[in-house]
Image: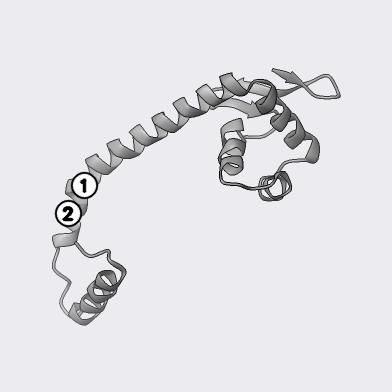
Amino acid sequence: MTLASNGQAAIIRTERGLTIAGTRITLYDVIDYLESGWSPKLIRDWLPLTEEQLEVALSYIDTHRNEVEAEYQTVLQTAQEIQDYWQEKNRERLAQIASISPKPGQEEIHAKLQAWKAKLGLAP
């Protein structure tokens, strides 16, 4: 845990993981943007953070690089597992929905939609 200049904790552990105190923004959110090549100024402008909050977060990440990176990889793996679970769970239902015939009078709209999907490479 890191202390802010006012003596209060700036990085705290919550049920969401390492979080910037007073926000719902995790260090993993900040790392996502850093990994995507965003500058600290852009991150601060995009996320509702003060300059001090972002500096504390970046300092914490830098100081505890190995632990934060290990947790970040765990978070990414968990997120991927959750996404895979829901994609598999919904696969059958989405196939059912795709096979439903258009309602009477909507055949033309359905055909246009299918043509756009095909053009975009989204059609099955």
The percent coordinates of residue 44 (x first, y second) are 71, 45
Residue identified by numbered label 2:
95
**Can you say whether 11 is above or below 102 in the image?**
above
Residue 94 is left or right of residue 49, and the answer is: left
| Mark 2 → mark 1, Cα distance in angstroms | 6 Å
Helix, strand or loop at mark 1: helix
The percent coordinates of residue 90 (x first, y second) are 24, 45
The percent coordinates of residue 23 (x first, y second) are 67, 34
- Quarter of the rendering containing residue 54: top right
**Can you say whether 22 is above or below 70 in the image?**
below
Residue 47 is left or right of residue 81, and the answer is: right
The label number, if any, that marks residue 91 in the structure image: 1
**Can you say whether 3 is above or below 103 in the image?**
above
Which one is nearer the viewer's eye here, 9 or 51? 51
- Quarter of the rendering containing residue 29: top right
Which one is nearer the viewer's eye here, 58 or 100? 58
Quarter of the figure with the N terminus: top right
Are the residues tagged 2 and 1 within 8 Å (C-beta)? yes
Quarter of the figure with the C terminus: bottom left
